[in-house]
Image (cartoon, rainbow, N blue to C red):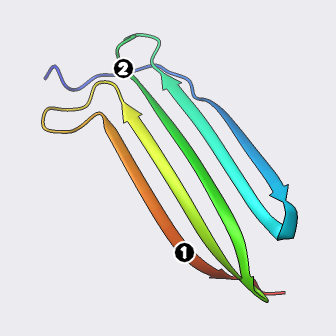
Amino acid sequence: SALNQNLIGSTFGEAYKLKLPRSILFTEGLSVTPAWNNTNAYSALGNAGLSLPVYKNFALSLNAIDTFLNNPPPGFKKNSFQFTTALSYTFQ
């Protein structure tokens, strides 16, 4: 079928972590995956998050993830956005 492809590609990515005042942690990442044998087949992913200390070893995490697929199968969208929250506990 025309939808099945054997692609040759690479992934290029970066990650960034920043410690802010009051033990707040900001993380960010980006990756791009181009296909070398079909220039229309590429995807990208970006994410950003904050971790906020709440009480003693508890932290609140707020994260956003955005994914993009240039050639999605019929019936699928190119872009997907997710927002998540979490409460975490750190053992010491």
Callout 1 touching callout 2 (CB < 8 Å): no
Identify whether 35 is placed above or below 12: above
Q: Residue at x 20, y 39 (%)?
A: 76
The amino acid type found where label 2 is placed reads Ala
Q: Residue at x 72, y 55 (%)?
A: 26
Place of residue 56 in the rendered image (x, y in percent of width and height, measured from the top left): 79, 89
Mark 1, secondary structure of its residue: strand
Q: Which mark is residue 86?
A: 1
**Quick one: quadrant of the N terminus?**
top left
- Earlier in the chain: of badge 1 and badge 2, it is 2
Place of residue 83 in the rendered image (x, y in percent of width and height, measured from the top left): 45, 59
Q: Residue at x 68, y 67 (%)?
A: 51
Nearer to me, 53 or 38: 53
The amino acid type found where label 1 is placed reads Ala
Identify whether 64 is placed above or below 8: below
Q: Residue at x 23, y 26 (%)?
A: 4
Identify whether 60 is placed above or below 76: below
Asked where in the image residue 50 lies, by quadrant, the reply is bottom right
Place of residue 36 in the rendered image (x, y in percent of width and height, measured from the top left): 47, 12
Q: On the image, numbered disc 2 is attached to which residue? A: 41
Place of residue 12 in the rendered image (x, y in percent of width and height, measured from the top left): 62, 27
Identify whether 10 is placed above or below 15: above
